[in-house]
């Protein structure tokens, strides 16, 4: 506990009356746990934490790590997103505490942020840009579908979306439909996903030029994983995908590797006039691994050209990670 407080203090955070830590507009919440075992790791949260900057899960007293998780990543995870929709969550006073096995999805997400103190820092080249000060090119995700009634289930929402996608597919020629179907039915040969959902550098958007300078903590992590550092403009997204355990195959007859593709590229809004998120211009999504895939050139062309294929990728990300920046798949 003393180490955490010391680290926060050295970064300019101060403890307030609500027993969390603040620095300007950033609020950090610490959750301490005494248990850290393969068959028992506790995770707790309160709904009021969703607008905080980061959550620190401290398992050090049980011999475990200290994990610094961006609040946006935690609350957009599949388990937490689904739990927040359940009556049991409301009945508990909009808070939750549960013991998981270490290999479960939510603990693995948290452990992916072990010692990520750099998330709290605003270092050179990694300025944390708050939503209120994002550039004019970026925007807050919209809600493409009309807001469903409170009794509308997630299945009803998926049915609406599936009908929309099927309509788009039916507009294509039989030849186009066959190509899309063949690639999607063999998607493991054309699309590689990360193993974890991480937001590598909260607030970062893709620069228009120059090279990126990573923090010493991230540089160390890259070296520990044996990852060659990519400092180009799209490098942070590539590094996020690789650090999250993603595979990047080589192209045939070429020294190049598959493209790392942002599945939310600002195209193919569900409804006309309601823009879709363009990840590279948004600090919550540019380095979000859940929105990144390594993609074969053929599948990459389909994702760029066809509404249906692009949204099949987005739906797959939602199923894997609960990632839904356009607020399409979750009832609101």
Image: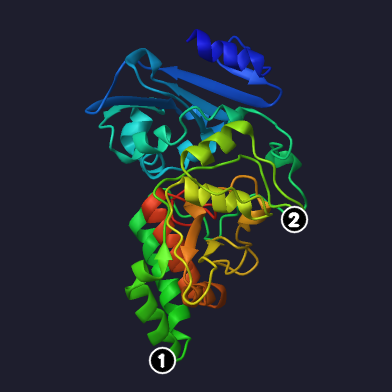
**Image quarter of residue 59:** top left
Out of 154 and 80, give the one closest to the viewer: 80
Q: Residue 137, labelled with which disc?
A: 2
Comes first in the chain, label 2 or label 1: 2
**Image quarter of residue 39:** top left
| Residue drawn at 58 percent across, 66 percent down | 269
Q: Residue 174, labelled with which disc?
A: 1
Q: Between marks 2 and 1, how big is the CA–CA gap?
A: 37 Å
Q: Is residue 183 above or below residue 228?
A: below
Horizontal and vertical percent position of residue 215: 64, 34
Horizontal and vertical percent position of residue 96: 36, 27
Out of 312 and 82, give the one closest to the viewer: 312
Q: Residue 204, labelled with which disc?
A: none
Query: SS at mark 2?
Result: loop
Count of numbered labels shown in the rendering = 2
In this orientation, does residue 286 appear?
A: no
Left or right of 284 on screen, residue 61:
left
């Amino acid at each position: 506990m003393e180490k955490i407080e010391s680290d926060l203090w050295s970064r300019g955070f101060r403890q307030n009356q609500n027993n969390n830590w603040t620095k300007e507009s950033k609020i950090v919440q610490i959750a301490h746990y005494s248990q850290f075992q393969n068959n028992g790791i506790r995770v707790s949260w309160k709904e009021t934490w969703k607008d905080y900057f980061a959550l620190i899960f401290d398992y050090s007293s049980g011999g475990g790590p200290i994990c610094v998780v961006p609040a946006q990543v935690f609350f957009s995870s599949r388990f937490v997103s689904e739990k927040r929709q359940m009556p049991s969550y409301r009945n508990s006073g909009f808070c939750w505490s549960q013991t998981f096995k270490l290999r479960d999805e939510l603990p693995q997400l948290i452990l992916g942020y072990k010692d990520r103190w750099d998330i709290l820092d605003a270092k050179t080249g990694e300025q944390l840009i708050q939503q209120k000060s994002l550039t004019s090119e970026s925007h807050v995700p919209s809600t493409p579908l009309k807001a469903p009634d409170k009794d509308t289930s997630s299945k009803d929402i998926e049915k609406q979306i599936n009908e929309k996608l099927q309509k788009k597919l039916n507009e294509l020629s039989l030849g186009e439909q066959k190509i899309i179907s063949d690639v999607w039915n063999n998607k493991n040969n054309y699309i590689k996903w990360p193993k974890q959902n991480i937001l590598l550098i909260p607030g970062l958007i893709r620069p228009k030029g120059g090279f990126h300078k990573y923090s010493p903590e991230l540089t160390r992590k890259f070296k520990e994983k044996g990852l060659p550092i990519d400092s180009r403009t799209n490098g942070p997204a590539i590094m996020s995908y690789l650090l999250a355990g993603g595979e990047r195959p080589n192209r045939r007859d070429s020294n190049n590797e598959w493209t790392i593709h942002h599945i939310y590229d600002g195209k193919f809004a569900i409804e006309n006039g309601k823009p879709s998120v363009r990840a590279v211009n948004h600090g919550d999504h540019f380095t979000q691994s859940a929105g990144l895939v390594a993609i074969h050139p053929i599948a990459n062309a389909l994702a760029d050209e066809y509404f249906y294929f692009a949204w099949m990728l987005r739906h797959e990300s939602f199923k894997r990670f609960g990632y839904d920046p356009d607020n399409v798949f979750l009832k609101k």
